[in-house]
Structure formats: structure tokens, C-alpha cells
Amino acid sequence: MNSFALRVKCPSRRGIVAAVSAYLADKGCNITDSAQFDDTGTGNFFMRVSFRSETGATLDELIADFEPTAKEFGMETEFFDESEKRKVVIMVSRFGHCLNDLLYRWRIGALPIEIVAVVSNHMDYQKVVVNHDIPFHCIKVTKENKPDAERRIMDVVEDTGAELIVLARYMQILSDEMCRKMSGRIINIHHSFLPSFKGANPYKQAFEKGVKLIGATSHYVTADLDEGPIIEQDVVRVTHAQSNEDYVALGRDVEAQVFSRAIHAHVHGRVFLNGNKTVVFPPSPGSYASERMG
């Protein structure tokens, strides 16, 4: 049986859940997981449903026959096959912890993605990437060549058919034009502290201030630097006895975990943009299962 999912966003009103459930039942589909959220502040309704087709209904058939229901409720909808892996381009500079973590999770099947290319402005990780049989593109970026460099990056994205760009500690600011063109399709990761430290060596600043929590934030990229809609966050506790180097190591670990969870949520269709925020539904049962152990 084919396993599909349906994403719905529409104005909130009575009967949405009933209409979706009745439609899937009539098409011979069995719902295996469902999540919904009614935002009373904005009046928006969000829903994600996983289901199996028990009578051979195809994705094209399901999409076409759902149009009257979608029109009736003013729905933005997306049907997709949960077995299909999303095509992803990874971008990285000289910090490799997130890249290496993603390569491992991809290799064991813990992330349902197809890494179609890795783009970097340095050569540091060429061998690692090529050894995974993944195309590596070194695209140097300077103040003078930035527009041309971004055109080359977008050529890679378009030529590979990538649906998502992930910035695995890519230390270049993307242009407003690229952010707009790929809106909702670029995910970034960065450290987060309370209080906040910006500029060079934030971990050293945090150490010197005696910060007790080190965190990481993963978000969609917008023209407002590091202020896009947040997908995932987490923290790790530190103490007075730990060194600046400990702060960096612990921060590295939490960044990798938060980043992978954000990507996992996106590729499973669990994230909905809701103005400047996101709605993130919990993972379906079995969605973290790996194809192999290592």
C-alpha cells in the first residue's frame, strides 16, 4: 500500500476535519496519523494527515478529486508520497560538524533526503563529500563577485532539481533576491544565547559572562538576518567549571541536533509558515526509524 500525506492550510471554520476524513475514507484510504491546529489569533487552520491507500488510489487521482473540497474551504493543499526523498543542497564553509552529522544521518537513512550537491566557498570538505559520491562545488565568494557566485549557486540548485537548501554553518550572507526566490526553502542553523552575543567569537563572550545555557536555533532564511521563522530550538546546560573550549564543543553538538531535527520536520511536511512564526507538528510514528544502524 502506498503511504501518502496531505497538508492543509485554510481559514478556520466548522467541518474541515470531517470533510478531509470523509474524502479519504471515500477514496479507500486509511488515516494512520493526524495533527491539527486552530490559530485563534490569526484565524488560520493547519492540518497534516498521513494515510495509506488501500484500494490503489494514485496521488494524481487524489489531488484531482480533492479540488472541489479544497475550493469549498479555501484550502492551500499539498499531497505527497511519504516514500519519496526530498532533494537537498547543503552549503558549508569551514565548520564541518553539521555537514558531517547530516552525511551520517543521510547515510543510515535517518533523514529521508537525497543530497544532490554540496556547495562551499572553501575546499576543506571536498574529499569528505566526494568520498560519499556526492557532487562538490567550490564557489568562492568575495564582495566583488557575490552576484555571480549566487547565480552559480542557483544554477546548481536548478540543475539538480533541489527542493531545499540547508546552510550547514555557511558563513556568507545571502542576498535579499536569493532569500525571496527561495522563500520557505532555505534553512539555517546558528548558536543562541541568553543574553545574546553577536560578532566575533560569541562562545568566548558567553564564557566570559558566565552563561549557564548554550542553545541553537534553526530557522527559515529571510532578508532579515537570523530573524526568519523559527523551526527548532534546544539548549544544553553549562557550569562555572567548564572552559571556553567546552562551550564550543557543547554548542557544536546542540547545533547539529537542532539542525537535523529542523530538516527532518521540513522534509516530512510537518512545518507550516504562519506569518512570522511556524506551526510544527510532532513526528509521525516510525518517522525517525533508520534503514540501517551505521
Image (spheres, helix red, strand yellow):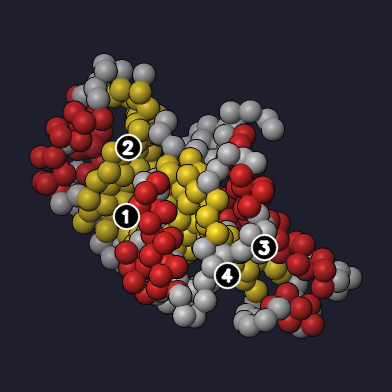
Q: Quadrant of the N terminus?
A: top left
> Residue 227: x percent and y percent?
46, 73
Residue 206 can be seen in this image: no
Looking at the image, residue 246 lies above or below residue 10:
below
Q: Which mark is residue 171?
A: 4
Q: Earlier in the sequence, mark 3 or mark 1?
A: 1
The residue identified by callout 1 is: 38
Amino acid beneath label 3? Phe
Cα–Cα span, label 3 and label 1: 40 Å
Residue 15 can be seen in this image: yes
Q: Quadrant of the C terminus?
A: top right
**Callout 2: SS:** strand
Task: Report which quarter residue 103 is drawn in.
Answer: top right
The residue identified by callout 2 is: 80
Looking at the image, residue 74 lies above or below residue 173:
above
Q: Earlier in the sequence, mark 4 or mark 3?
A: 3
Q: Earlier in the sequence, mark 4 or mark 1?
A: 1
Label 3 near label 4: C-beta < 8 Å? Answer: yes
Amino acid beneath label 4? Met
- Residue at point 42%, 31% (across, down): 83
**Callout 4: SS:** loop
